[in-house]
Image: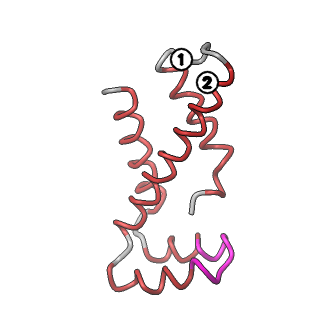
Amino acid sequence: MTNNNAPDLASYIDELIAAKGLATIDPDLLEEMKKDLAARLEDQINATILANIPSEKLTDFEEFLSSESDENVQAFLRANILDLDEVIAQALVRFRNAYLGL
């Protein structure tokens, strides 16, 4: 659900790693860490999105996911989640705080 923002998420992950002081570790290990963080972050965002979709729209959303383009899925989410950008921003902050131990 979050592939449209992949470059932004990659930059966000780079910032998290730098804030944790791990940007200078072995390049192979760093790459694995980035992949792991990206998967965990995407899971966090997706879980937050699902938690904010009205329950009566979940079945529609499941059907929508399998048959529609990313743009149409984004439009569905914007139509059914009040302030989608804020919801995603809150998920990013929660992930950051958990990762950095804040």
Q: Quadrant of the N terminus?
A: bottom right
**x, y percent for residue 94:** 36, 42
Q: State the count of labels.
A: 2
Q: Dot 1: few (<14), some (14–19), or many (≥20) neighbours within 10 Å?
A: few
Instruction: Find disc 1 in the rendering and name its residue.
Output: 22
Name the side, left or right, on which 31 lies relative to 21.
Answer: right
| Magenta span | 65-73
**x, y percent for residue 14:** 60, 29
Is 72 magenta? The answer is yes
Question: The disc labelled 2 sits on which kind of residue?
Answer: Leu
Q: Residue at x 44, y 76 (%)?
A: 80
Name the side, left or right, on which 63 lies relative to 68.
Answer: left
Q: Dot 2: few (<14), some (14–19), or many (≥20) neighbours within 10 Å?
A: few
Q: Are marks 2 and 1 in contact (CB under 8 Å)?
A: no
Task: Tell me, for residue 29, which label it has, or none.
Answer: 2
Depicted 90 relative to depicted 2: above or below: above
Q: Residue at x 40, y 80 (%)?
A: 58
**x, y percent for residue 18:** 55, 20
Q: Residue at x 60, y 80 (%)?
A: 66
Task: Tell me, for residue 59, which label it has, or none.
Answer: none
Question: The disc labelled 1 sits on which kind of residue?
Answer: Leu
Q: Residue at x 53, y 17 (%)?
A: 22
Name the side, left or right, on which 23 lies relative to 81.
Answer: right
Element type at marker 1?
loop
Mark closer to the chain start, 2 or 1: 1
Depicted 88 relative to depicted 37: above or below: below
Disc 2 to disc 1, C-alpha distance: 10 Å
Depicted 49 relative to depicted 12: above or below: below
**x, y percent for residue 74:** 58, 70
Observer-side mark, 2 or 1, equals 2
Is 78 magenta? The answer is no
Element type at marker 2?
helix
